[in-house]
């Protein structure tokens, strides 16, 4: 951590300790929906308030507001810098502050933790600007922070483009298409003006340049905007395959540094990643797409309840906007009129956050709708056998036929979807599959934090996670004694685990090691993180008391599995230390024994949760 002076000059004394239980907050003119209280609540246990001030109230608050420390946002960062007694080196060089702490003698110390957050954003995204040319879009406060940080990170040159700089406007961007990195610090594309973009980046990405001195391609794009999650600039990067990062990690990173200043205690950088992922998951819409009648409404309503979110039926919104049912819209305005209205509704819904949205089957026929929905959403395709699709009240399904409609749209559903689930069983199975896919997309911890807000003691909608542990030589399957262990290789085992996971809607993690201590470590790490274990200890079955002790210590239900029929083999293989604590043992079934073990474990836990065992 940086040294923090206790007062205006070094002659006045040593730093005072800060108050980790003090009162802190954020000041600005219009704060609206701020993530800051949520972020600071995750970082530390102190009160954090939002305070909206008019310009003539700022100085009195800063000097007499009674806060132990506070963050500052637009438009007061420069104003508050002039009111501080001492500035950090970063704040002095940038010319503004976003964090102030009141020391024990009343001295005001100002820092610019955006500097720290910006560097964290770039470095954690793997954007090494050493020796590179960087184009910075915008000339405001965030731009100044970026310029100073980029210089300190070793950028060879930083070119600032802004509407206020003659000869270096955003329209002049193509003159600098040799840049390796682009950083957007303008508000272009920020909610509610999304998904607009300040520039088009395709020219920056072209490879095989022939102009002398021009570099090939674009190595990365950073956008300090974080709402929407994917600005127009970020969506361009996705399409063109350019590495990119939005500003959420910068926001959390600067808050982490501010928390250290407020509390006087270090905070692990791992907290930045954890909180960033959690907020991203909480704010991201889940957008259901798929053929008409595939079950989006039923699944969407169940999913929204599980996530504690509002479910929005896009077709219902369209009918409300038109004041008439969809068949009448088609009859009076044709499909073109309906699609135009649909796009208006997609623009409205897609700009919001934290919803579950069920879309009409034809939403994918209009390319503009993709950006509108994906800017803040993960697109989840619901797939259902054609013979089970409901066509009642669906004009195009009835007029064109389900088969013909599917042929026209199949490639679009596949191209748009981030995730896909099959709706070929009960609604509960479909919901379980949705939750499993979201756990993979967001991370189990982030999904768990969302579900915990719905019911802290009811994890029933969170997909179960099982850990498959393999001991020595299992990685040699297909090579090692095929007559005993079979011809199927280790890759086939992993594929079987993945197929079983997707089919039955639970998550499976796999770990293999040839070392006893590593296996013990992995079992201990599983405590509190998985619901059950399937273990094939290999040769350690017959020798390892340590594995038995570890399994008993973590108190996680587990199934013992062996590929061969060990009961018909050598005498020394008749001893199994782990068996005495296993809920069952499966032997002699080849690699399918792992699937059987997972299903036995899952059934056991379902029965246990229902009170049947």
Image (cartoon, helix red, strand yellow):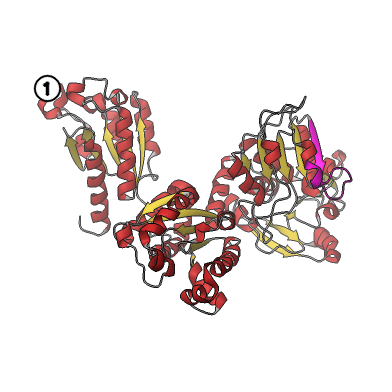
Relative image position of residue 178 (x, y in whole percent): 74, 33
Please indicate, yes or no, whether residue 62 appears anywhere in the rendered image.
Answer: yes
> 519 and 66: which one is in front?
519
On-image quarter of the N terminus: top right
Residue placed at 76% from the left, 60% from the top? 28
Please indicate, yes or no, whether residue 459 appears anywhere in the rendered image.
Answer: no
The residue positioned farthest toward the right in the image shown: 166
Relative image position of residue 401 (x, y in whole percent): 37, 63
The residue positioned farthest toward the left in the image shown: 568
Left or right: 355 as drawn, with respect to 79? left
Q: Which residues are magenta?
A: 157-173
**Label 1: which secondary element:** helix
Q: Residues within 10 Å of mark 1 (few under 14, many from 20)?
A: few
**Quick check: is 78 in the magenta stretch?**
no
Left or right: 426 as drawn, with respect to 213? left
Relative image position of residue 496 (x, y in whole percent): 29, 38
Q: Is 594 placed above or below 274 here?
A: above
On-image quarter of the C terminus: bottom left
Q: Is 308 placed above or below 84 here?
A: below
Residue placed at 71% from the left, 33% from the top? 180
Relative image position of residue 73 (x, y in whole percent): 75, 55
**Quick check: is 164 in the magenta stretch?**
yes
Q: Which residue is mark 1?
A: 571
Q: Is 189 placed above or below 526 here?
A: below
Disc count in the image?
1
Left or right: 375 as drawn, with respect to 289? right
């Amino acid at each position: 951590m940086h040294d923090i002076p206790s007062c205006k000059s070094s002659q006045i004394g040593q730093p005072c300790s800060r108050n980790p239980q003090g009162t802190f907050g954020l000041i600005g003119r219009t704060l609206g929906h701020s993530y800051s209280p949520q972020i600071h609540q995750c970082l530390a246990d102190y009160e954090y308030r939002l305070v909206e001030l008019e310009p003539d109230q700022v100085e009195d608050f800063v000097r007499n507001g009674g806060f132990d420390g506070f963050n500052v946002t637009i438009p007061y960062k420069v104003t508050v810098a002039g009111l501080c007694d001492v500035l950090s080196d970063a704040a002095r060089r940038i010319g503004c502050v976003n964090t102030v702490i009141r020391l024990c003698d009343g001295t005001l110390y100002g820092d610019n933790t955006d500097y720290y957050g910006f560097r964290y954003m770039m470095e954690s995204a793997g954007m090494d600007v050493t020796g590179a040319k960087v184009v910075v879009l915008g000339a405001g406060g965030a731009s100044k922070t970026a310029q100073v940080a980029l210089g300190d990170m070793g950028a060879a040159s930083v070119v600032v483009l802004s509407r206020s700089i003659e000869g270096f406007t955003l329209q002049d961007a193509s003159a600098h298409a040799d840049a390796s990195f682009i950083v957007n610090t303008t508000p272009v594309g920020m909610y509610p003006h999304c998904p607009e973009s300040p520039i088009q980046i395709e020219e920056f990405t072209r490879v095989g340049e022939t102009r002398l001195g021009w570099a090939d391609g674009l190595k990365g794009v950073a956008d300090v905007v974080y709402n929407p999650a994917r600005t127009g600039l970020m969506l361009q990067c996705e399409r063109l395959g350019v590495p990119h990062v939005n500003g959420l990690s910068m926001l959390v990173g600067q808050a982490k540094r501010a928390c250290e200043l407020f509390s006087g205690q270090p905070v692990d950088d791992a907290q930045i990643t954890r909180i960033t992922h959690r907020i991203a998951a909480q704010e991201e819409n889940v957008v259901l797409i798929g053929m008409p009648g595939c079950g989006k409404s039923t699944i969407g309503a169940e999913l929204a309840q599980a996530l504690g979110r509002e479910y929005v039926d896009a077709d219902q919104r369209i009918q409300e906007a038109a004041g008439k049912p969809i068949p009448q819209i088609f009859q009076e305005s044709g499909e073109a009129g309906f699609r135009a209205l649909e796009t208006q509704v997609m623009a409205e819904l897609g700009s919001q956050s934290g919803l579950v949205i069920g879309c009409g089957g034809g939403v994918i026929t209009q390319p503009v709708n993709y950006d509108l929905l994906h800017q803040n959403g993960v697109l989840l395709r619901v797939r259902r056998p054609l013979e089970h699709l409901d066509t009642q009240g669906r004009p195009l399904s009835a007029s064109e036929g389900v088969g013909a409609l599917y042929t026209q749209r199949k490639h679009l559903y596949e191209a748009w979807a981030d995730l896909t689930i099959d709706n070929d069983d009960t609604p509960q199975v479909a919901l379980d599959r949705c939750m499993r896919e979201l756990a993979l997309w967001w991370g189990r911890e982030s999904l768990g934090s969302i579900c915990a807000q719905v019911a802290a003691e009811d994890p029933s909608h969170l997909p179960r996670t099982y850990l498959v542990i393999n001991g020595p030589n299992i990685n040699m399957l297909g090579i090692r004694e095929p007559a005993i262990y079979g011809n199927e290789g280790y890759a086939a085992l992993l594929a079987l685990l993945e197929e079983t996971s997707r089919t039955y809607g639970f998550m499976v993690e796999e770990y293999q090691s040839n070392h006893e201590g590593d296996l013990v470590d992995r079992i201990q790490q599983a405590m509190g993180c998985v619901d059950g274990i399937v273990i094939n200890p290999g040769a350690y079955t017959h020798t390892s008391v340590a594995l038995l002790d570890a399994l008993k210590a973590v108190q996680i239900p587990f199934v013992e599995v062996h590929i061969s029929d060990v009961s018909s083999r050598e005498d020394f293989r008749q001893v199994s230390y782990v068996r005495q604590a296993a809920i069952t043992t499966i032997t002699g079934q080849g690699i399918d024994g792992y699937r059987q073990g997972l299903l036995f474990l899952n059934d056991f836990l379902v029965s246990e949760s229902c009170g049947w065992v």
